[in-house]
Amino acid sequence: MAKILSVELQKIPKYINVGDDINDLTVLTTIQFHELDLKLEMPYCLHVFVYDIHGALDAPLVIPNWDESVVVSIALGRKDDLLGQEATMIKATEAKMTIETPMALTLGRFNKEMSPISRKLEVFATMAPIVGRASKYSEPFTSQITY
């Protein structure tokens, strides 16, 4: 079982531009692997999520499914906004690794009348091993119920 030691930003941008596809930040995730992970060269999928936090931090509910894992936020107040997510496949080949994940954030549409505003952003990282639980929701559907 791997352990995420830290999730940090390589550098915090002074400004994040709305409406571009430029990598706004790079997330550094430091991971420590168990001896068994190293022996088996265990594959993992690292998921990194960036949120715009509105008040109290939402509790994350991770629905693991290898490379398609999702996080459902359980709002403790106003719901936080997901600004970006990336998935990176890694293999346990060293006892300690630092993974760089460049991220382009989705912030909405450009409005020439906007002025810079400060936002509280946080990064959440989770890993799904190749051996472990897998989960997935169906697509939403509509049906009629008769009595």
Image (cartoon, grey):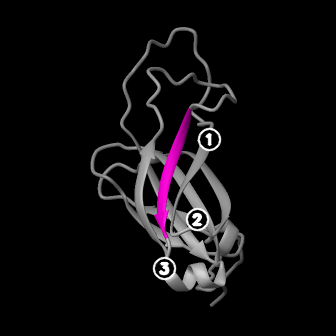
Q: Which residues are magenta?
A: 25-32
**Which residue lies under the disc numbered 2?**
70
> Mark 2 touching mark 1, by CB under 8 A?
no
Q: Nearer the viewer, mark 1 or mark 3?
A: 3
Amino acid found under the numbered disc labelled 3:
His
For marks 1 and 3 on the same chain, the one whose residue lies earlier in the sequence = 3
Q: Amino acid at mark 2?
A: Val
Characterize the local packing of mark 3: few (<14), some (14-19) or many (20 or more) Cα atoms within 10 angstroms: some
Q: Which residue is mark 3?
A: 34
Q: Which mark is residue 62?
A: none
Residue at x 39%, y 21% (from the top left corner): 117
The span from disc 1 to disc 3 (Cα, nearest Å) is 26 Å
Name the residue at 37% across, 44% down: 53
| Front of the two marks 3 and 2 | 3
CA gap, disc 3 to disc 2? 24 Å
Question: Residue placed at 51% from the left, 69% from the top?
Answer: 95
Percent x, y for residue 10? 48, 37
Residue 138 horizontal/vertical position (percent): 70, 75
Q: Which residue is mark 1?
A: 102
Q: Is residue 111 left or right of residue 59?
A: right
